[in-house]
Amino acid sequence: MIANTEIICGDAIVELKKFSSNSVSLIIADPPYNLGKDYGNNHDLKEFDEYLDFTKRWLFEAKRVLKEDGTIYVFMGVRFVSYLYDILDRKLEFFFNSWINWHYTQGLGRTKGFSPRHDDILMFTKSKEFNFYLDNIRVPQKYYRSRNNMRGANPGDIWLFSHVHYCNGNRQKHPTQKPEGLIERMVLASSKENDLIVDPFSGSGTTLRVCQQLERQCIGIELNPKYVENTKSRLHQEFVGFDSVDERMSRIPNDLNDDDMRNKYFENHKKWFLNNHPDALENFKKEASKKYKEKGKRTQNRIVRQ
């Protein structure tokens, strides 16, 4: 147990049964895609019907433990995503909200057919009344207009985050590690501080790490003892910023022509969009200074001082 986080070594279905009903605000689940990956102490390869039965069983428990205003995000590969949707929608009668496409720049290479460059994430809620904190996840506008929300735009359902590359200092020894910026968006959108979040397939521990920094309570469940120990070590590491960010977060709106409006915007950009991304903040400062250098030293000095 590290502060607000807990990692449990066990089977997702068995451990979810131990949770009280209506006790969890948010579930972020990245279950095995049933593609035959080797996870050390188990292989991700079940018979077709066996895998669907497994999916229904853990999702049944997930719905039971969710609060009435709770949300679930589930990652899935293309082979089973339609069946997952059917289970969530028709079998368990969750309420559909979004079909999110996580687009990444690198993936499996193919010589026949098109190389995959995305994963799907299904967002469902337990009821029609659910929590969604849009201001926490807005992205900067392309252009500033007085009728626009200066706070930013809805990020939409196409999410661009790079994989956590093997050269990244935060790369874990796990075959399907997810970027922290990706999980950050889900946590900020669908929970508030001190809410309880559960990750039934904790893997490399990304959800726990993100919740640790965003002051949420989080419980992860992981079948492989090796990954459990790796996660414990990860949670002790110094935090220097999340390992990924939506490239739009450094976008500087065009037409910020009024000095006072522009300076006010620059002062707010960090806390609105880059609070946990110091590397991206440095890039934003450089680009903002370059774009608006013709507006005079007043603007440039204001940017540098932030």
Image (cartoon, helix red, strand yellow):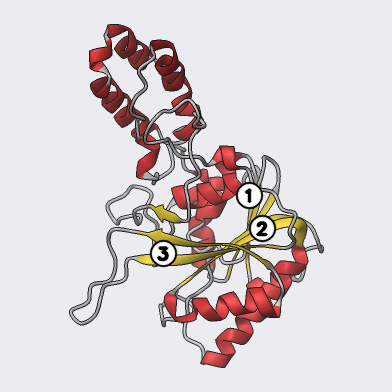
**Vertical arrangement, residue 154 with respect to residue 8, above or below:** above
Label annotation for residue 174: 3
In this picture, is 168 found above or below 74? Answer: above
Describe the element under mark 1 as helix, strand or loop.
Answer: helix
Residue at 63% x, 79% y: name it: 87
Spot the residue most to the left.
Answer: 111
Residue 143 image-quadrant placement: top left
Quarter of the image where the C terminus is located: top left
Q: Residues within 10 Å of mark 3 (few under 14, many from 20)?
A: some
Q: Which mark is residue 71?
A: 2
In depth, the one of 292 and 196 nearer the eye is 292
Callout 3, which amino acid?
Answer: His
The residue carrying pointer 2 sits among few (fewer than 14), some (14 to 19) or many (20 or more) residues within 10 Å by Cα, namely many
Going from the N terminus, do you reach mark 3 or mark 2 first?
2
As helix, strand or loop, the secondary structure at mark 2 comes to strand
Q: Disc 1 designates what residue? A: 190
Residue 13 visible at all? no
Q: Is residue 11 left or right of residue 259?
A: right
- Which residue occupies the extreme front position in the image? 147
Circle 3 SS class: loop
CA gap, disc 3 to disc 2? 26 Å
Q: CA distance from mark 1 to mark 2?
A: 7 Å
User: Are the two marked residues, 1 and 2, in contact with CB atoms closer than 8 angstroms?
Assistant: yes
In percent of width and height, residue 210 lies at 53, 47
Name the residue: 46% across, 17% down: 264
Earlier in the chain: of badge 1 and badge 2, it is 2
